[in-house]
Image (cartoon, rainbow, N blue to C red):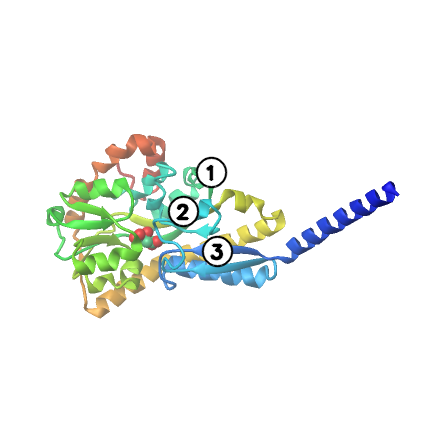
Amino acid sequence: MLNTIRALAVCALAFSSLAALGAQADEAILIKFSHVVADGTPKGQGALLFKQLVEERLAGKVRVEVYPNSSLYGDANELEALRNNEVQLLAPSLAKFEQYTKQLQVFDLPFLFDDLDAVNRFQKRAKGRQLLRSMEDHNIVGLAYWHNGMKQLSATRVLQMPGDANGLSFRIQPSVVLEAQFRQLGAGAQKLPFAEVFKALQSGQVQGAENPWSNIHSQKLHEVQPFISETNHGVLDYMLVSNSRFWYGIPHQIRMELEGIIDEVTYAVNRQAEAANQADRQRILDSGRSQVLELSAEQRQAWRDAMRPVWQQFETAIGSDVIKAAQTVNRKHRD
Ligand code: LMR
């Protein structure tokens, strides 16, 4: 009798475990992808393409929800939400990780990369690839680099030479390197979430900002910044990141398929980003709302000379090996 009861109990347990597994197998994995920009920007388009390809190829196995424009999480809390697995994909700008690694600050150094092609070369080389793994101690895994573009300076006054920025206050991303960059110009800097930039410029809380064309246009910043100087003085790029435990917990076959999709999306985003920024530059010109100032070689050199001392300040924190590796990617190698 006792043996029969035991046998029945074992059967019941086995059945309930199988039922649980079955239920799990039926349940699609949900990936929430949160970001702070508009759908029409390079990152916004990348998120939507990722969702589309996953739903075409992994229907029933993986579901993707995209939350643009800080509608789920914003700059202040998105990385914490990722680490708590409340959201599974983000693509913060490389300036937003300094709490977790100092090495990525290399991307904020002014005038380090001549253009987006140079940034691309660095990201593809060994040192750039290594940086994708630089936050694993914090449960953050880097899956890819996505481009936005080179940053331009906008302000309420014409910025032709570095001294013109003196006394203005600029909105910056949360990066001590960017703070130091504006200090070099005798300007102030306020760290503000992206969602607050338009209002802060409109109200006069800050008088200037630095952004790629796509962010300026999609946030309508050109409507509250009468002057934009085409400085191309730094880069605003992204790292597509996930929660390490979540990512490596995805069944192997599905994870491989997701990583293949990410490679495809990365290729598409990075191929189109420069053209998208140039199209937005043209839209800003056509709007007539803001005057775009092209700098002469001498003027650009003056900005470079003014900002360049920032490199030394952060060399130890970032690592001179990382900075040296980044310096070799420009076509014309400079010190
Ligand atoms: C910013 O805060 O200016 C950018 O990082 C926003 C973005 O994600 O492009």
The residue lying at 27 percent from left, 56 percent from top is 196
Q: Which one is in front in this view, the residue at disc 2 or the one at disc 1?
A: 2
Dot 2: within a 10 Å radius of its alpha carbon, few (fewer than 14), some, or many (20 or more) residues? many
Q: Quadrant of the C terminus?
A: top left
Label 2 lies in ligand 1 vicinity (Cβ under 8 Å): no
Residue 105 drawn at (x, y percent): 32, 40
Which label sits on residue 26? none
Circles 1, 3 touching at the beta carbon (< 8 Å): no
Circles 2, 3 touching at the beta carbon (< 8 Å): no
Front-most of residues 232 and 4: 4
Whether 259 is drawn above or below 198: the answer is above
Residue marked by disc 2 = 79
Label 2 sits on what residue type? Leu
Whether 19 is drawn above or below 319: the answer is below
The residue lying at 24 percent from left, 65 percent from top is 284
Residue marked by disc 3 = 32
Disc 1, SS: helix
Residue marked by disc 1 = 136
Relative placement, left or right, of 305 versus 175 is left
The residue lying at 59 percent from left, 62 percent from top is 59
What separation in Å lies between label 2 and label 3 (alpha carbons)?
Answer: 13 Å
Q: Residue furthest right?
A: 1
Label 1 lies in ligand 1 vicinity (Cβ under 8 Å): no
What separation in Å lies between label 1 and label 3 (alpha carbons)?
Answer: 20 Å
Residue 200 drawn at (x, y percent): 21, 56
Label 3 lies in ligand 1 vicinity (Cβ under 8 Å): no
Label 3 sits on what residue type? Lys
Relative placement, left or right, of 143 versus 299 is right
Q: Quadrant of the N terminus?
A: top right
Residue 154 drawn at (x, y percent): 20, 56
* N-term-proximal mark, 1 vs 3: 3
